[in-house]
Image: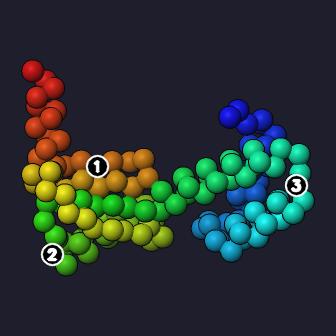
Amino acid sequence: MKISKRAQSDARQLFRSCQVNGLLDENRVRQAVTLVLAQKPRRYIEILSRLLRLVKLDLERRTARVESVTSLPADLQMDVANRIKKIYGDSVSLTFDQNPALIGGLRVKVGSDVYDGSVRAKLERLAAGF
């Protein structure tokens, strides 16, 4: 669905109004959606769909997923968490998962950024070179 520039602009403005100190406030988002649904301005469906997209992107940017072959010791988890928070800020929430397919190393995904230091990725790059 193509969204008009006006609807995009309104959604961005609505999104900015839902932020407190640079962080998205869940209650403000709910209030904004309720208000838009009550008023039903022109192209309100487009505005809400764009707002949903912006909220999803913001949540993805503030979520980090760390994968390793085995569970990481607590001190290593703290070190990884501190490094991620140093780059992306303290508001990032982290999850540590196990993925035996990696063979070894770590894979970190924050939003659309992927840092893949796994043995599997290195083998795939090596295989692609031949």
The image's colouring method is: rainbow
- In x, y percent, where is residue 60? 48, 57
Query: For the residue marked with disc 3, what is the amino acid?
Result: Lys
The residue indicated by pointer 2 is 73
- In x, y percent, where is residue 111? 44, 52
The residue indicated by pointer 3 is 40
Picture quadrant of residue 6: top right
The residue at the point 24 percent across, 59 percent down is 67
The residue indicated by pointer 1 is 115
| Earlier residue among tags 3 and 1 | 3
Query: For the residue marked with disc 1, what is the amino acid?
Result: Tyr
Q: Could one spot residue 51 in this view of the protein?
A: yes
Relative to 11, is 111 on the left or the right?
left
Residue occupying the far top of the picture: 130
Q: Callout 1 environment at 10 Å: few (<14), some (14 to 19), or many (20+)?
A: few
85 relative to 107, above or below:
below
The quarter of the image holding the N terminus is top right
